[in-house]
Image (cartoon, helix red, strand yellow):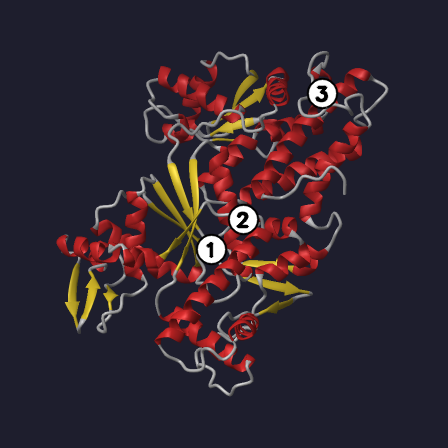
Amino acid sequence: MIKREIKRVLAKRLEELNYELDRDDIDVEEPSNEEFGDFASNIALELGSEGDLPPRELANSIANGIESELFSRITVAGPGFVNFHLKKDFLLKGLSQLVGSSDPLGQSSVNEKETIQIEFVSSNPTGPLTVGHCRQAVLGDVLAALYRALGYEVETEYYFNDEGRQMDILARTLWARYRQALGKEVEFPEDGYKGDYLVDIGEDIASEHGDTYSSWDDETADFFKRVGLEEMMARIKEDLDLLGVQFDSWFRESKLHEEGKVEEVLSALDERDGTYKEDGALWLKAEEEGAPKDVVLVKSNGDPTYLLPDIAYHLNKLDRGYDRALVLLGADHQRHVDNMKAALRVLGFPGDFYQVLINQFVSLSNEGEVKRMSTRAGEFVTLKSLVEDLGKDVVRYFMAARKPESHLEFDYELAKKESMDNPVYYLQYAHTRIASIFEKSEYAALEGDFPLEGVDLTELGEDEEIELIKKLDKFPEIVEIAAADYGPHHLVSYGENLASIFHQFYNKYKVLTDDEGISRARLALCKGVQLVLKELLKLLGVSAPKKM
């Protein structure tokens, strides 16, 4: 990767000048003005402001002392920018390595491969997954793919709360729907779940069990809680499968209670003087650990709050040997995150173990009108209906397109378009165009690797060709940035830019020409673009079609 090599060269030169810097501390960027070279660094400005040499003088010392075959020249501009002008041969070497290896990622620069657990979605099993859950499902799934591509050991997990008041409400609501299916008059719970999904389940139970559960008692409550849980989890799994999301493991909150893990956490917190009693409740000393204020762990009636089993759950994660536990949470969970961090600090957890990605909400817009949604009121658009209407590719792409911390307004009208206006089709069509080119070429019968024997890449020299080569070289870096930043949107932005450059190239130049040398060189370039596009779409969980 070009940028990595420039950083290496700079680090070596700075060491000669008695500046000990890690490559990661050296900033290298692509100038917006081509006159300033292919890449530039402001390292002289940063170091010059701290040392004895003025920045421009230091920049000249850096530039004049670099001996490398990578650059046609190195210049200094402005107050001390070091500009690197690459030799064409070096750029072509990168393309040759990409096409020759058929490996778009090359060798990752990540040295320590941690074991990472990613927990996401984790919706209470009280209703269908909605568009909000859909965004988190895609984000978590793409992050898992990114880390696996970089060589990490990754496990994905869905944690569901099968304990607590919401499960009691689900059971009571389902029983009411069951009685209504039998034609019986029954009072609907004031805080019950109003969606039609429980009507269907209630009718199935009525058909199978008749009037067996005519009164509400402990046996009835246990039955409807169990059946409600099983039915909702089965539907959640089916919905996620439509989206192409499968979890490595499913974890029940009840397991923590059954195995005494919740009590163990309480004892551990008490031993570390992390709790106190007040007004009959047990409180966590969260404020001492950086949270806005102390928080209740056990209510005055003896019931645990949501926080307590979640602390036990993360102790379970630590015991399972993960180096890092990444959790994706909705925007309404920030206070919970502060309290969790406080509790884990009391327990002595490693500071970087608990990682959180807060993703903002999703709204659907169609022709400018935004749809408001409420799960409890039964007013929402389900993940299932969205995928069935638009297709998995479109939904996944749109859900990954924006920074997770930004609100996502899902443009339904745009998502429905099957044209180049739709960014998904725009990106996929670049891959399709390349497949079409190869079908018409002498390599039509080949599958997989592209033979570079007899291909003279020096035939490539047009601006668009060089721009494509430099863009392809940047792909491994983008993957690492997307993983480190918990940002699948980096893939989307890069992919759209790469597709744009390729479409411009395709519309301006013929790949298959009367000149065999140029044709083969451009086919090699197209193969490089195809390899990167295919890998990028794979990471996003989007198909790379050969025909559209």
How far, Cα to Cα, is label 1 from label 2? 11 Å
Q: Residue at x 64, y 26 (%)?
A: 469
Of callouts 3 and 1, the N-terminal one: 1
- Callouts 3 and 2 close, C-beta under 8 Å: no
Look at label 2 and name its amino acid: Val
In the rendered view, tell whether residue 228 sits above or below residue 11.
below
At mark 1, the secondary structure is loop
Q: Which residue is mark 1?
A: 121
Q: How many marks?
A: 3
Q: Residue at x 68, y 42 (%)?
A: 427
Q: Are marks 1 and 2 in contact (CB under 8 Å)?
A: yes
> Relative to residue 111, is residue 428 depicted above or below?
below
Marks 3 and 2, the one that precedes in the sequence: 2
Q: Which one is nearer the viewer's eye here, 81 or 282?
A: 282
Which element type, helix, strand or loop, lies under badge 3? loop
Identity, as a three-letter code, of the amino acid under mark 1: Val
Q: Is residue 77 visible?
A: no
Q: Quadrant of the C terminus?
A: top right
* Helix, strand or loop status at disc 2: loop
Mark carried by residue 460: 3
Left or right: 298 as drawn, with respect to 461? left
Q: Nearer the viewer, mark 3 or mark 2?
A: 2
On residue 245, the disc is: 2
Q: Does residue 279 appear to the left or right of 184 in the view shown?
A: left
